[in-house]
Image (spheres, grey):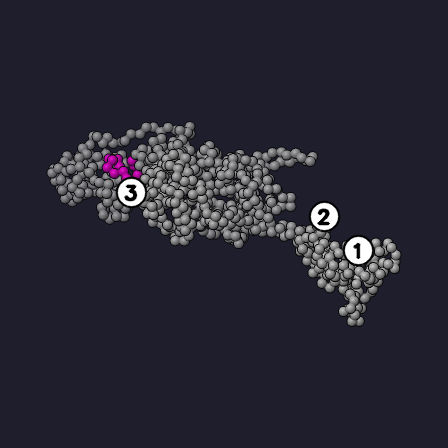
Amino acid sequence: MSADVHPQPAWAWPLDLAAYDRSGELNDAEMSALDEVLRGKCWQAIRLEKSSELSRLSRPVADALALTGADPPIRRGVMKLMVRETKRRGKAFWAWSREEWIEILSDTYTFHRRHGVFTICRQYVLAVGYLLKCFNDVSALGSFNRQRLANKVFGKGRVNASVDAVTRTLMSWGYHNANTTVEFRSALCEVMLANQSPRLQDLTAEALKAARHPNSPRRLREGIFSLSRVLAGMGIIPKPLNQFCLKQPGTGDATLGVPAEWVQIVQRWRATTTCAPKTRTLYYGLTLKVGRWVSQTHPEATSPQNWTRDIAAQWVATVCRLNVGDWVETRKRHPNWGRPLSPRCKLHHLGALSTFFRDCQEWEWIPRRFDPGRSFAAPRSLLALISPNPRVIADDIWAKLLWAGLNLAESDFSQAGSGPSCYHCYPLAMIRALTMVWLFAGMRRDEIRRLSVSCVRQQMIQGDGSEGYVCLLVVPASKTGPEFTKPVDGVVGEAISAWEQIRPEQPAQVDEKTGLMTRYLFSFRGRRISADYFNRALIPTLCRKAGVPLVDALGSITSHRARSTIASQLYNAKDPMSLFELQQWLGHRTLTSTQQYAKINPIKLAKAYENADYFRRNLRTIEVLIDRDVVINGTAAKEPWKFYDLGHGYCTYDFFDQCPHRMACARCAFYRPKGSAEAQLLEGKGNLLRMRQEIPLTDAERAAVDDGLAAMEKLLAHLADVPTPAGPTPCELKTSGLVRLKIRAASPSTERRANQMVAG
């Protein structure tokens, strides 16, 4: 027990019930005395109390009323009611059943109309039944002031002492006006009445669970849950109640329609497996669904040890065609009832059964008849429909959200509106710190909720002759790795430090992942911030302040989209982070996960495409000279009029773009070297029309342009036997060129005759 809790004095039941005659039957003398009292014209409680025949009935009621401090008019009204009901039922109140007490007390309006007494007498009748231990099921009476009943039964001083002790704890956690919260006081008094003791030290977790049943009002259940957190913080109970442990009325039995032997081994697996709590709960329900399916399709295999590879294959085929609501026993219909399951949901069905059979085989509960990993593997057609899809928020929308977060004010939560987005119960400093972490830290929602106190620190860095400080944030262990430290912007550290300075002291809680007692940073009033607060309150408030819609082209703006947006911006920055650096910053176990988050910005991708010069790389611009004189005078049909500039000469072939030797000219008959007299005369003409023509390049030609000599030689070798537009191949032209060189060395006259022969 906490040292702050002062031990309360022991409390014993105020009435000695053993001193009363608790017989339920009425004798003849008591019946006659009741008739005589009821026939009296004026009701006198004193006359009833002094009646020797009715002392067995009147004395316990009088003692109980004396403890409650009832006034004489109230005493007369209660006595009158008790006598009438005793006469009408023909038995003493000691023998009244629970249903009879509920009928007598009913509700306030019916009580006054039926019995004709003061409305306030209802609480005193209930106090009499409670003190005499005839009726203590106060939760069955609906809504009424439970603290007044507790004051009458236990004493106002004792009740106030317990209420004040809990109130002090709540005030230290950040509650305001906790002593006036009707739901909280009602919850505390409800538990004390159910536990039959006003002492906090006598309260147990079992008593809280018994008082928090599904039929109780919602506010009362929430109050009992808050009380359990207070008692756990005070050290009275080991841990608070689970907020979602109650099964609501009408939800049905999870094991309905499942064979008993299947239920037995599934429940045994749930109690043995080491999966995470959420995974364990999910797989438990999915495995029970398999039990309903197998009980109708394969009655001989209602036990996992009778399953075969063929039955496993049939279940995989069934999952691929499964619809919402199939093989489910529930009265609550889903909005998508009858529609096909999503691919991820189908994958969960297969993963649940694979894990179940793998564990049962490993623990030797069932024989090994097949390999669960292969038998329940997801088909390729199903895996093709599932892929990571981080949805990056557009830069203009994200910039507006950053502005809204940096300028968040109290008035942003008091604007007109309704719904969860306008809900505000946390201090502004806490919301600002939460917003800065979400906008700048790139963390998962669960990681933000599990941040601990003193998770940021300033560290000096030195380099290049300068000094500075960097803000480091300690990220808790997550689903992909252990705890690690990452650098963040200074605005995150400033916001967290501002919140820690005014943060009320909160009780340490058990971290569900590490099992350690942790002082959570974003904890207020004894509990962590809700997981739905991001999507239901914080993000709608930021969107409303920034003037952006909650839904963009990629869907709703959710908490996890900030992580992908920040990762993409860091990857597309002017001095970007590498994938390995981004992997460490995000806390990913594998580089593949980081690649899914780091999306290249379309603008950066467009610049990279432009720099690659894809269009120009596949086209080559050739200068074309057109001799207008030849075209005008009509001699274009007999002599060349179009000349393609090759750099080292000109090509007069009209269909140059179709020539295979255009990038590796073979010097055929259409070639005119620039050193010749004809080419010099062509360049000297002033009536030339100069144009440029784009020629598409093949892969080999593009390689010759890009890679240089080696590719050019390869291209020449490839075209060695390809005919030129003039007819001969490059090999033949090369041979005739050697002949010309030999003839030229002999004599000029011989050279002219040889050239004529070659030309012919």
Of 207 and 701, the residue lying toward us: 701
Judge by depth and name the residue closer to the eye, 96 or 710.
Answer: 710
Q: Label 2 vs label 3: CA separation?
A: 95 Å
The secondary element bearing badge 1 is classed as helix
Identified at 43% across, 43% down, the residue is 375
Identity of the residue drawn at 25% across and 43% down: 102
Name the secondary structure under disc 2: helix
Quarter-wise, where is residue 729 in the image? bottom right
The amino acid at mark 1 is Gly
Q: Position of residue 553 (x, y in %)?
A: 53, 54
| Mark 3 or 1: the one toward you | 1
Q: Quarter of the image containing the C terminus?
A: bottom right
120 sits left or right of 551 in the view: left
Residue to which mark 3 is pinned:
140
Residue 671 painted magenta = no
| Quadrant the N terminus occupies | top left
Q: Which one is in front, 614 or 678?
A: 678
Query: Which segment is the magenta one?
Result: 130-154
Q: Indicate whether 694 appears above or below 152.
A: below
Residue 710: assigned label: 2
Side of 3 relative to 719 (left or right): left
